[in-house]
Amino acid sequence: MSQREDRQQSIEDILAGCSNRVRKDHINEICHTHSWSPPEVTYRMLFVIEDYKLLYCDLPKCGSTTFKTILGDLVMPVGYDYDMNHFTDVTGYRMFDDLSKEEQEVVMKDYFKMIVLRHPLDRLRSTYMDKLMLVDPDGNRTRENYKKGIKQYLIEKGQVTEESFELHKDIMNFEQFLDLVSLQRANFKNIHWDTYWNLCSPCEFKYDLIIKLETLNDDVQGLYDYLRSVNSSARLPEVIPRTHIRIRDKNANRLSVVSDMLKDMNQDIITNITELYRKDMIWAGYDWNREDGAICKLGSRSCC
């Protein structure tokens, strides 16, 4: 067995519950069964850490800040205050898009590839809370960037007039946000609510490690195990570092919040938004129904 296979087997042994192997087998089956392809292949979210032969698909609102901090701490001083907008400039890490064709082929063949996921509807909830509802610099920028699209939508719905919107800077509610996202208008597109399928090309990149935020505390050990197998002295945090993710007791259902938010929502809006993210939910192992709400479902298995 090769060193890379040894590392992978170790990770299979570490992950509990709905194991990494089950997740990988599920994705492989979906890719084999369905002839889906993204409208255009994009590599803009793929980080390459050459010293560790690691490729990471950096999905916004899927622990992005947390995992970039973990990976950044491998090369930066302890406690370094990262500007995530200039992460590659600071760390020296590269983007897959910037590699030559030959370098890309080496990465796809030989590098260890990881992705971090969460239920798409919970990701939308988190995006809405952080980018449109909370009063913080980043949220303010998002609202300003998409003010035209938000205003157009609210005026069409009869919620505001041109004058009242400018006066009160009305913020749409979560139901309206989902409705507007489902319309896929050019003036309201953003990587924070783009699909996993478009951003991470799961059938092109065969990911070796699939981490779920729903089981983050257990799953992150798989990453740590891989990094230590490359460098036994790798500096890794004892707990998840400086994270915006609120980690609950592992027995708590982190999907209950978004389920409660959706249970009384307009059925047509839920149908439209779940249809938009249907591919994401199928291949990543999630589902939604009125009775159970947002759930994990890997084929016939009710685990994440």
Image (cartoon, rainbow, N blue to C red):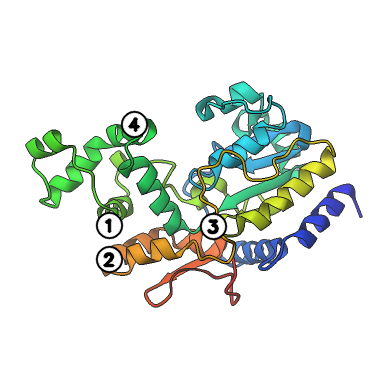
Which quarter of the image is occupied by the C terminus? Answer: bottom right
Mark sitting earlier along the chain (4/3) = 4
Mark sitting earlier along the chain (1/4) = 4
Task: Give, as a three-letter code, the residue at label 3.
Answer: Arg
Q: Residues within 10 Å of mark 2 (few under 14, many from 20)?
A: few
Contact (Cβ within 8 Å) of mark 2 with mark 1: yes
Task: Give, as a three-letter code, the residue at label 1.
Answer: Glu
Q: Residue at x 53, y 30 (%)?
A: 84
Report helix, strand or loop for mark 2. Answer: loop
Task: Give, as a three-letter code, the residue at label 2.
Answer: Met
Residue 69 position within the rendered picture, expressed as x and y whole percent measured from the top left: 61, 35
Q: Disc 2 versus disc 1: distance between alpha carbons?
A: 7 Å
Which marked residue is nearer to the observer: mark 2 or mark 3? 3
Nearest the viewer among 152 and 205 is 152
Mark sitting earlier along the chain (1/3) = 1
Residue position for label 3: 248
Q: Which residue lies most toward the top here?
A: 89
Residue 237 position within the rendered picture, expressed as x and y whole percent measured from the top left: 69, 40
Nearest the viewer among 263 and 204 is 263
Report helix, strand or loop for mark 4. Answer: helix
Residue position for label 1: 175
Residue 136 seen in the figure: yes
Q: Residues within 10 Å of mark 1 (few under 14, many from 20)?
A: some
Residue 75 position within the rendered picture, expressed as x and y whole percent measured from the top left: 71, 27
Residue position for label 2: 265
Task: Give, as a three-letter code, the residue at label 4.
Answer: Arg
Left or right, 159 with reference to 286: left
Q: Residue at x 31, y 32 (%)?
A: 145
